[in-house]
Image (tube, rainbow, N blue to C red):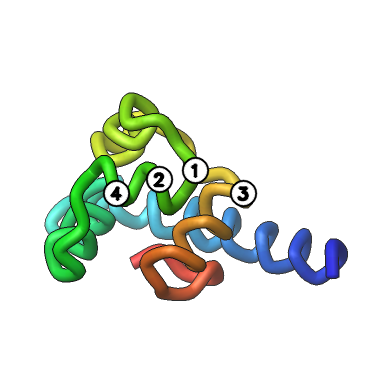
Amino acid sequence: MLKKFKRIASDFLRTTKLVYDFAQHNSDWSKPPGNTIKDILKEKNLSVKDFANIIGFSEYNTEKLLLSETEITPLIAYRLTNSIGGSIRFLG
């Protein structure tokens, strides 16, 4: 299981880097991950406090994530996938 998680996390990080690099040259194509997460929270009617509890973060660290001031590590990607859905393989 750990081997599979490491492979998925590695794929996710590689994809995230590609998306980030592309967005640097096509700024109207993409938006920061925090904005995407905020949109999902709004759709699911989740408060920052509730979301923080779900992913096991403090409200302060959750706010930093929503401001795109936190790197999306494999662990954070895993928590996001399990809490708000989506694929760990693609950041969109």
| Residue type indicated by callout 2 | Asn
Q: Evaluate if marks 2 and 3 touch, with contact meaning CB atoms under 8 Å apart.
A: no
Q: Which residue is mark 4?
A: 50
Give the image location of residue 71, x and y in percent. Answer: 47, 37
The quarter holding residue 22 reads bottom left
- Number of callouts: 4
| Residue type indicated by callout 4 | Asp
Q: CA distance from mark 2 to mark 4?
A: 5 Å
Q: Which residue is mark 2?
A: 53
Q: Which residue is mark 1?
A: 56
From the viewer's perspective, tell me whether residue 22 is left or right of residue 42.
right
Q: Which residue is mark 3?
A: 75
Disc with the residue nearer the chain's start (1 vs 4): 4
Q: Quadrant of the C terminus?
A: bottom left
Q: CA distance from mark 2 to mark 1?
A: 5 Å
From the viewer's perspective, tell me whether residue 68 is left or right of residue 43.
right
Disc with the residue nearer the chain's start (1 vs 3): 1
User: Circle 4 sits in a helix, a strand or a loop, which is it?
Assistant: helix
User: Circle 2 sits in a helix, a strand or a loop, which is it?
Assistant: helix
From the viewer's perspective, tell me whether residue 2 is left or right of residue 52.
right
Disc with the residue nearer the chain's start (4 vs 3): 4
Which mark lies nearer to you, 1 or 3? 1
